[in-house]
């Protein structure tokens, strides 16, 4: 998912002349976009600095560094108790330093949602011509807004449900501690336009954890964002379509290998959420 957005933003910056062979790409990311940009920067011979925070999975940091990216961890919390504001402030200061840094700004870059408007949404439409409900996780809201705009502008009668984390402020929720990177924000993204969204589901992180473990027990090793989307989709369908079987799609944006040190690690679960058995029901 993030490769689509990363490629679209880099290509647009190159076309516009903002990004040259001497530039240094800089972006704030909790992990997945950072890895996508690391891949693209390496393939183009460009330097890349990822500005992240302590919630970023150690495995994601190792992947980025292995691909030649520089990873900087910002621990300053913003007014809502999250790290996004601090990360963005760090990026802005870096760009103001005059060192040739180019910020793609995934939170406001229209090429983020255009990548999904042109790629992800048409692919879903072709595969599921009778689609009734689409569940999309909300991070930067690039995937969400690209898909929502596509189905609205093509006059497809698809209900768009955004899935967010409890503690995220994207849709006006109260800020709370969030430990699972990926979905949710502590600063509302500029891309979000709620007029394109039919409903929002907020998922507690304990439900995310239970869902990824339940999926893994069936042979599907998914990441935290996917666990959140699947949990929210299941709950929404049970409430809105009891006993029915609508054509519904939930976009799964991440796999589980990068979460082996966190969501699937007993000591991490105990440190941040208490007794794992109480969460997982073992």
Image (cartoon, rainbow, N blue to C red):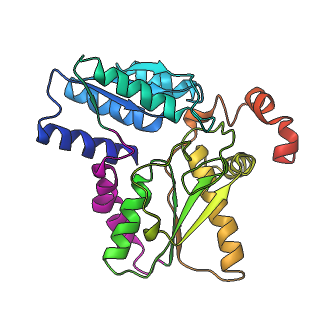
Q: Is residue 60 left or right of residue 220?
A: left
Residue 111 or residue 82, whichever sits in front: 82
Quadrant assignment, res 82: top right
Residue 90 location (% of width, % of height): 42, 24
What residue is rendered at 50% in x and 58% in y? Answer: 251
Residue 201 or residue 31, whichever sits in front: 201
Relative to 260, say whether 161 is above or below. below
Q: Is residue 222 visible?
A: no
Quadrant assignment, res 21: top left
What residue is rendered at 52% in x and 73% in y? Answer: 198
Q: Is residue 151 left or right of residue 176?
A: left
Residue 218 location (% of width, % of height): 68, 53
Q: Is residue 121 magenta?
A: yes
Q: Is residue 51 left or right of residue 40?
A: right
What residue is rendered at 38% in x and 27% in y? Answer: 91
Residue 36 location (% of width, % of height): 37, 36
Q: Is residue 203 magenta?
A: no
Q: Is residue 163 left or right of residue 154?
A: right
Residue 129 location (% of width, % of height): 39, 78
Q: Main structural element of the magenta stretch: helix, strand or loop? A: helix
Magenta stretch: give its range.
105-131
Relative to 95, say whether 80 is above or below. below
Q: Is residue 205 visible?
A: yes
Relative to 141, say whether 72 is above or below. above
Question: How many numbered discs?
Answer: 0
Name the image quarter holding the C terminus. Answer: top right
């Amino acid at each position: 998912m993030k490769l689509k957005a990363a490629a679209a933003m880099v290509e647009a910056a190159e076309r516009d002349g903002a990004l040259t062979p001497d530039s240094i790409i800089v972006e704030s990311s909790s992990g997945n976009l950072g890895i996508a940009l690391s891949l693209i920067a390496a393939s183009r011979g460009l330097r890349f600095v990822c500005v992240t925070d302590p919630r970023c999975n150690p495995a994601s940091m190792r992947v980025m560094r292995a691909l030649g990216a520089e990873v900087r961890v910002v621990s300053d919390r913003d007014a809502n108790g999250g790290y996004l504001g601090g990360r963005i402030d760090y990026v802005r200061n870096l760009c103001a330093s005059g060192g040739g840094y180019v910020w793609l700004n995934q939170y406001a870059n229209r090429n983020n949602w255009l990548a999904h408007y042109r790629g992800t949404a048409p692919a879903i439409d072709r595969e599921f011509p009778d689609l009734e409900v689409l569940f999309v996780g909300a991070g930067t809201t690039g995937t969400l807004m690209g898909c929502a705009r596509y189905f609205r502008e093509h006059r497809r009668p698809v209900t768009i449900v955004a899935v967010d984390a409890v503690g995220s402020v994207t849709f006006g929720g109260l800020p709370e501690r969030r430990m699972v990177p990926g979905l949710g924000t502590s600063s509302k993204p500029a891309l979000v336009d709620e007029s394109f969204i039919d409903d929002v589901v907020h998922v507690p992180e304990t439900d995310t954890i239970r869902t990824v473990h339940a999926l893994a027990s069936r042979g599907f090793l998914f990441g935290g964002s996917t666990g959140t989307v699947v949990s929210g989709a299941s709950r929404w369908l049970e409430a809105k379509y009891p006993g029915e079987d609508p054509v519904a799609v939930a976009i799964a944006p991440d796999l589980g290998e990068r979460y082996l040190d966190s969501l699937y690690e007993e000591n991490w679960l105990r440190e941040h959420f208490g007794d794992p058995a109480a969460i997982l029901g073992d």
